[in-house]
Amino acid sequence: MIKVSDKTIRHTKPILSQYSVKTHGGNILFMLPAFLLFTFVVLIPFFQGIPYSLTNWKSIISSDYEFVGIRNYITLLSNKFFLNDFVHTLHFTGLYILGANFLGLVIALFLWRSSKLNNTLRTIAFMPFTVALTSAAIVWSYVYTDITTPLFNIPSPLGISSQVINGLVIIAVWRDMGYCMLIYIAALQSIPYEYYEASCVEGASWRQQTMYITIPMIVPAFTSNITLLLAWGLKVFDYPMAVARNMSAAETTAMYVYNNIFGFNKAGLGQAAAITVTLVLLLLTQIATRSLRRLEVEA
């Protein structure tokens, strides 16, 4: 017989194994440069700007300012120019998200299978994303005025107040739908093909497969694209600044911030607007992310 001593032997499981430490440590080291850059370029300037938003600071080259509390924030709530610019930004962002995601998904559904032709077409669809924002706006300004107008006798939307936002949306959707396409293609290729085979056995049509298999399985891709495009849309600056700078109907909140800090000598008010827009961006991003994450769990 084997006698077991009365002493209790406790086996303590290490919190992190040596492999985990090496893996996570390596990941952290790879992320460290990006995190440091984000900290020095975004986080530190943001927190440094909060005290200035509570002053009547005139210009970035001026060191004279007085504390005024939340007066700048109260002014923003009653400032029709800021409110109009905020509405323009929401208008642009809503159409931009819908257009880029819809076209990106449609293209992905046609090109998600790998072949030489599909790979070539994917490259062509993604190429606009490599173009700088300002360059894209200038090229499309030329397309509107020198190609569309002579051929179809249609005036450029960039010169009409009621259509300028739609004109800017077309530029943004053309540039970024290729990015959305790649995210959707990656999601489509990760769906097990057995699901489609089983549905075919049950007699499901292509529409039913799309509605009950494809769409639910790519909800994480919707989360990534919608959240990212929401952030890009709410801080849009390059497009209107490049081709519609003198039109009040095309001004966005980012332009309002820029004009007050660098043009109107109201740096304190501009800084307050920048912080307000950032907080709205964080709030809307969190709402969108949590709402879409619930759909991911249900799927």
Image (cartoon, rainbow, N blue to C red):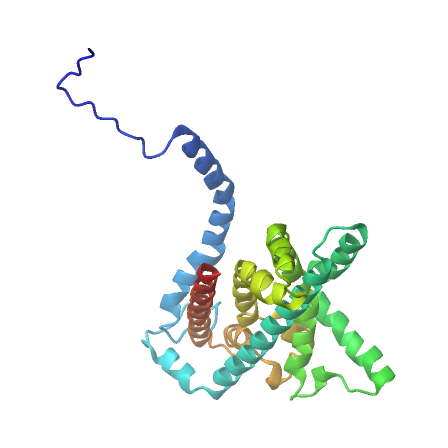
* Residue sitting at the far left: 6
Residue 101, percent from left and from top: 62, 68
**224 sits to left or right of 245:** left
- Which quadrant of the rendered structure holds the N terminus? top left
Q: Is residue 76 visible?
A: yes
Count of numbered badges drawn on the protein: 0
Tell me what residue is drawn at x 65 percent, y 56 percent. 185
When the figure is inspected, residue 104 is found, relative to residue 191, above or below; the finding is below
Q: Is residue 39 left or right of residue 211?
A: left
Q: Quarter-wise, where is residue 291 in the image? A: bottom left
Image coords of residue 76 (percent x, y): 42, 82
- Residue 190 visible? The answer is no
- As drawn, 31 above or below 15: below
The outermost residue toward the top is 1
Instruction: Indicate the position of residue 19 as horizontal and vertical percent values.
Output: 43, 30
Position of 37 with respect to 129 (left or right) is left
Point 44% across, 36% down: residue: 25
Closer to the camera in the image, 140 or 238? 140
Q: Is residue 241 above or below residue 186?
A: below
Residue at 65 percent of width and 58 percent of height: 200
Q: Residue shown at 44%/38% (left/top)?
A: 24
Position in image of residue 194 (x %, y %): 61, 51
Image quarter for residue 271? bottom left
Residue closest to the far right: 151
